[in-house]
Image (spheres, helix red, strand yellow):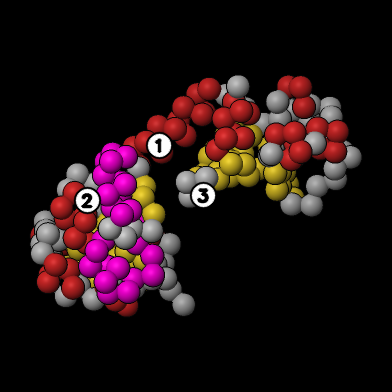
Amino acid sequence: MKKSIAVLGLGRFGQFLTSELSKNGADVLIADDNEETVRKFANGVSCAIKADLNDPEVIRGLGLGGVDTVVVSMGSSLDASIMCVMVAKELGVPYVIAKAASLRMGEILRRVGADEIIYPEKESAEMTARRLLSSDFLEFFDLGSELSVFSMKPKKEWVGKTLRELDLRGRLKLNVIAMREGGHTSATMDPDRPLSADADLFAVADHEALDKLLH
């Protein structure tokens, strides 16, 4: 069964999100007050509506009660964001994600009912900073506000040692979940096989452990 998602607000973030959701087969409803933008994305979604997202009655008329997730992506408009979050929760939407332009805005949106707050610029900057600070890291994906999954090259001091010897989970709270080597990726790793410099490790860690790993 397709997951149904409503994207309210089609700024740059909303547009990118809509494109990715549509590309991956989600059932997407979009709404924005810019008719030209709505028309531009109408062919790739199940429902495209020109709407004043400051008006609670208009928001109620979008049919949000039947969707799995609402993404409120007007990061620069606090009033409209508050209204959309509140109405979505009143209509019984199980999960509401709100984009925020600042920590203060995020706190306000959480207080009025948002289940998750995202800061796209901040998160993008953090991931870029991590890559710049360590040449070992290849890719980052944040899993909510506490965990990240990432791929990395073994640190120089790890090469030639086994996962059992390194005890990464115990020492660094780093959980290695898979390894790629010689074009082959496996989640069943031999803990007594020495790591090679060419291996790619896939791991999960909380942000505190990740910061310690960088330094």
Residue 215: percent from left, percent from top? 60, 22
- The answer to whether 24 appears left or right of 199 in the picture is left
| Amino acid at the residue labelled 1 | Ser
- The answer to whether 88 appears left or right of 204 in the picture is left
Q: Residue at x 43, y 62 (%)?
A: 24
Image quadrant assignment for residue 202: top right
Q: How many marks?
A: 3
In the displayed structure, 3 sits above or below 16; it is below
In the displayed structure, 4 sits above or below 76; it is below
Give the CA separation, mark 1 to mark 3.
13 Å
Image quadrant assignment for residue 29: bottom left
Specify start and end residues of the magenta stretch as a single range: 85-111
Q: Which residue is mark 2?
A: 74
- Label annotation for residue 176: none
- Label annotation for residue 124: 1
Q: Which residue is mark 3?
A: 143
Residue 41 within the magenta-colored segment of the rendering: no
